[in-house]
Every structure is written in C-alpha cells, then in structure tokens.
Amino acid sequence: SYVHNGDMFRSPFRDRDEKGFVDAIVEDLRHVIATTTAGDVACMIAEPIQGVGGFTVPPDGLLGALQEVCREFGILWITDEVQTGWGRTGENFWGYQVHGLEPDILTFAKGLGNGLAMAGVVASASLMDSVNANSISTFGGNPLVCAGALANLKYALDHDLQANSLHQGATMFSALRPLVDELSIVGDVRGKGLMVGIELVGADGREPNAAAAAAVLEQCRENGLLIGKGGLYGNCLRVAPPLTLTDEECAEGTSILVDALRAVNGR
C-alpha cells in the first residue's frame, strides 16, 4: 500500500499551507490502513527526501506525524537513509532527524562506501534478534570494504563534511532558486544541503517537461558537468555533488548548470 508523498509541487494537496498539507497526508495514511490492509501491517518505509522520485522534500515534521499513526497500530518505522544519510542534507547527520521521529530500523548504503560496495541495517538488538531465519551474503562483512567505510566516516567527521554540505548547498540554492521566476521551464527548485532538485515544466508552469530535462543534462555533460535526472515523469534534474565539494568547484558547477538552463529555456 502507498501513501501520498510529501511533494508539495505536484500533490493534490499542494494548495494547502504546510499544516493543512501534513494533516491531509496523515488522514490519507489512516484511510490507507483502514481500506487497503488487514490492519496487521509490519512496517512503513520512507525516504526523508525521495531520491529517484526527484528529490521531493516534504514539510519538516511530516514523517514524525505519520509515525505517530504507525505507533497507534503497532507499525514499525523504517527510514531509508541511502541517499540522505551521513550529513548530505546539511542540517542533520540523518535525514529523519528533521521530522522529530525515532526510527525502529535505519538503512544506509553507498554514501558510506564512497564507491565501495557497502550497505547496512541498524535496529535495536531485540528487533534484530527476533529474525531467526538463516541468511548468507557473499560479500557481507567484507573486511576490506569495512575498513574503507570506516576511513570514509572518519574523514567525514574530522572535516565536518556535513557543515560543508550545508554551506555549498546554500550557495547553489542562492543561484538556482531565482530561476523559478526568471525561466519558464523551471517550475520548482528544492532540496537540502547537497541534494538539489530542479523540476522542469512546460509553458503552463505545471506540465512535466522531460525533453527539457534531457536537454539540460546533455548540455551540462558537454560542458564538463555530470548531473542526474529522475522524478515520476523524468523531468527532474538531480544534483548531488560529493560532500567534499570546494567553493571553486561549487561555483564552476553551478555556473555550468545555470548556463545550461538558460540555453535550453531560450530554445
């Protein structure tokens, strides 16, 4: 079963203020539990910021409000921190922390590996020990990868890469957010820290413009900048630089991206 996400740009509840938006999503969760489940639900899993979904950012506190409903029904909460973890959002070390919740299970992966095949699950001992099934993983517990992951974590903490993510992200947003008013193809600029999403739209300001997203991505590539795209309609640019991004790299990459957006907008 699925609950409405926190996408305030496309949600049917987008015309409400943040409190009204949160209240509507909470009510939707209650409706989903009542009408699409038998009432005995194992867990709810959510990304604090949707990754492949187009870096959609829910209002702060939304997930905490949803967890309160889950607690009423004995439903475990899983926070998927594969993309938001390790300080990428700038504001917090984990994405869930802005929502005032306490996850029962936390998943993480590539952000810690920095190119190495690393992933993990964190939960209380009582919860982890309740799973009695046998399991085996060919690469699980790889000591070389674990050593690399520990080195990455130490570097991130020693150099306060979370603070750098917040700083560089603020620089990028200051250059990108004004484009919503300047360029007709830019419908929304959103994100936190070094998770930057740009939703491209048609002339009506709402119709998804996947062609423009593909054109901007290619224009950036031709000028030396690799970005991604995603979203339900393939019209969202996703920019997630390394947490080690320097001021000079940030300025150069942001300039290439802005120039590409202006060029495609003018076609």
Image (cartoon, rainbow, N blue to C red):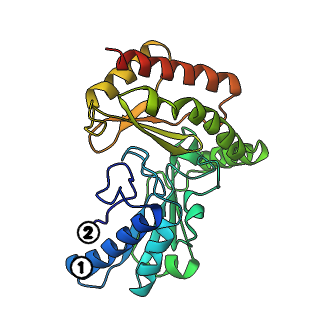
Left or right for 118, reference 249 = left
Please say if 33 is above or below 156: below
Q: CA distance from mark 1 to mark 2?
A: 7 Å
Q: Is residue 65 above or below residue 82?
A: below
Q: In the figure, residue 198 lies in which quadrant?
A: top left
Residue at 37% x, 48% y: name it. 9
Q: Point out the residue furthest to the left here.
A: 35
Q: Nearer the viewer, residue 254 or 202?
A: 202
The local secondary structure at tag 1 comes to loop
The residue tagged 1 is 37
Residue 220 seen in the figure: no
Residue 54 in which image quadrant: top left
Q: Which mark is residue 1?
A: 2
Q: Could you tell me residue 168's position as x and y percent?
A: 65, 35
Q: State the SS at label 2.
A: loop
Which residue is pictured at 36% across the width and 78% down the height?
Answer: 42
The answer to whether mark 1 and mark 2 are in CB contact below 8 A is yes
The answer to whether 44 appears left or right of 119 in the picture is: left
Query: Is residue 216 positioned above or below 143 on the image?
Result: above
Say whether residue 256 is left or right of residue 154.
left
Q: Residue at x 29, y 37 (%)?
A: 234
Checking the image for residue 48, the label placed there is: none
x, y percent for residue 22: 43, 67
Tell me if mark 1 has few (under 14), some (14-19) or many (20+) residues whose alpha carbon lies within 10 angstroms of its own.
few
The residue drawn where x is 51% and y is 74% is 104
